[in-house]
Amino acid sequence: MQKANAELLRLRALEELKEKKARLASLIDSMSEAILEIDAFGFITMANPAASLLFGFSQKDFEGILVFSLPLENGLGQVGSSRLK
C-alpha cells in the first residue's frame, strides 16, 4: 500500500512539473523581450521568438551558435558580454 501511494505521489509530482514547464515555455514564447538560454561554454541552447525577430535567425538556427558570434549593435554587445563574464 505504501509503495502504491508513493508511486501515485511521484506521478502527480511529475504531472505538475510537466504543467509548470509548459506554462513557463508559453510565457517565454509570448514575451516581447529577446531571451536566449546559454550553456556554460557560451553556446545558445534556446531562443524565444522575440530573439528570432531581433537577430534574424529562426529559433532552430540559434542552437549551437556561440553567443559571442551574434551580430550585436547599438551597445548590446557591451551589455551582453559584461553580463556573461
Image (tube, grey):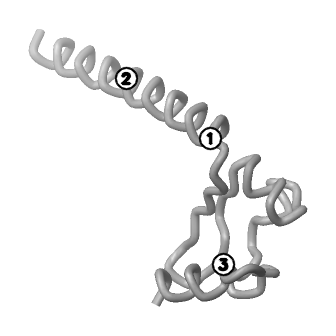
Mark 2 vs mark 1, CA separation in Å: 23 Å
**Between marks 2 and 1 in the image, the one whose residue lies nearer the viewer:** 1
Inter-mark Cα distance, 3 to 1? 19 Å
Q: Residue lying furthest top in this view? A: 1
Q: Which mark is residue 16?
A: 2
Q: Secondary structure at mark 3?
A: helix
Q: Are the residues flagged by discs 3 and 1 in contact, CB closer than 8 Å?
A: no
> Which is nearer the eye, 14 or 52?
52
**Where does the N terminus fall, quadrant-wise?**
top left
Residue ID for mark 3: 76
Residue 31's mark? Answer: 1
Rendered residue at 30%/25% (across/down): 13
The image position of residue 55, as x and y in percent, is 83, 66
Q: Is residue 79 above or below residue 53?
A: below
Q: Marks 3/2: CA distance?
A: 37 Å
**Kind of residue indicated by mark 3:** Leu
> Residue at image x 65%, y 35%?
30
Tell me what residue is drawn at x 18 percent, y 21 percent. Answer: 6
9 versus 21 height, above or below: above
Front residue of 58 and 40: 58
